[in-house]
Amino acid sequence: MTTTEARPGRMSRREWAAVVALLLLAGVVRLARPDLTEFKADEGRLLTLALATAGGEVVRHGIASSVGFPNAPLSAWLYALPLLLWAHPYAATLFTGLLNTLAVGGVYWLARRYWGAPAALAAALLLAAGPWAILFSRKIWAQNLLPLFVVGYIFTALLAFGEGRRRWLPVHLALLAVVAQLHYSGLILPMNT
């Protein structure tokens, strides 16, 4: 953990340009051509629940997990937000892409604060341009909503516990609840942080 004195200072113009380029790259590959995004049974089921939520129905669970146990409804509730504006699968696909583009910015911000600009640029580039990261950052799946919230969860953990800034603890716990309700894999995070 770096101390306040060791944290990176202001960003240079070159660094700003690199960050903007990375975010543009991330946005283009996540938001362009939503028609090329895979759409099968799970995506259809989740979209159906989200459309029901957007239509005013109170959805009490998400789609079934791989072991048959239903997921929490938070993913359907979140996907309902873009569907309120446009009731089309592209709206949910673009919403996923937008959240994951923001996650690239979050990774940069987190890494820069604690490990400096070179590490931040490298981490953001890997997330922005990684083929699997791109593929899964566009699909309508509950777990594909995780990256932005996981970055927030980790960042608030570092603030609350690493830096002793306890006012971030409620935000950290709220993000843990969001992550765990988006996908059960989020329950593993507290064991690894």
Image (tube, helix red, strand yellow):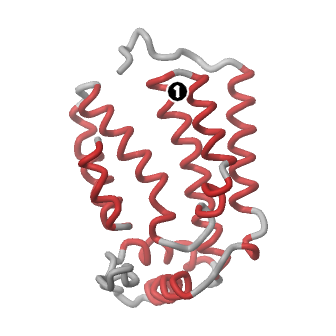
Q: Residues within 10 Å of mark 1 (few under 14, many from 20)?
A: many
Q: Is residue 57 above or below residue 26?
A: below
Residue 95 located left or right of residue 15: left
Q: How many marks?
A: 1
* Residue highlighted by disc 1: 112
Q: Identify the image quadrant of residue 95.
A: bottom right
- Which residue type does callout 1 highlight? Arg
Residue at horizontal 52 percent and vertical 42 percent from the top? 106
> Residue at 65% of width from left, 67% of height from top?
94
Horizontally, residue 59 falls left or right of residue 137, namely left
Relative to 117, 49 lies left or right? left
Query: Which residue lies most toward the top here?
Result: 5
- Specify the quadrant that holds the N terminus: top left
Residue 105's spot in the image, x, y percent? Answer: 58, 42
- Near-viewer residue (121 or 188): 188
In the image, is residue 123 above or below residue 172?
above
| Residue 83 drawn at (x, y percent) | 57, 79
The answer to whether residue 6 is above or below residue 93 is: above
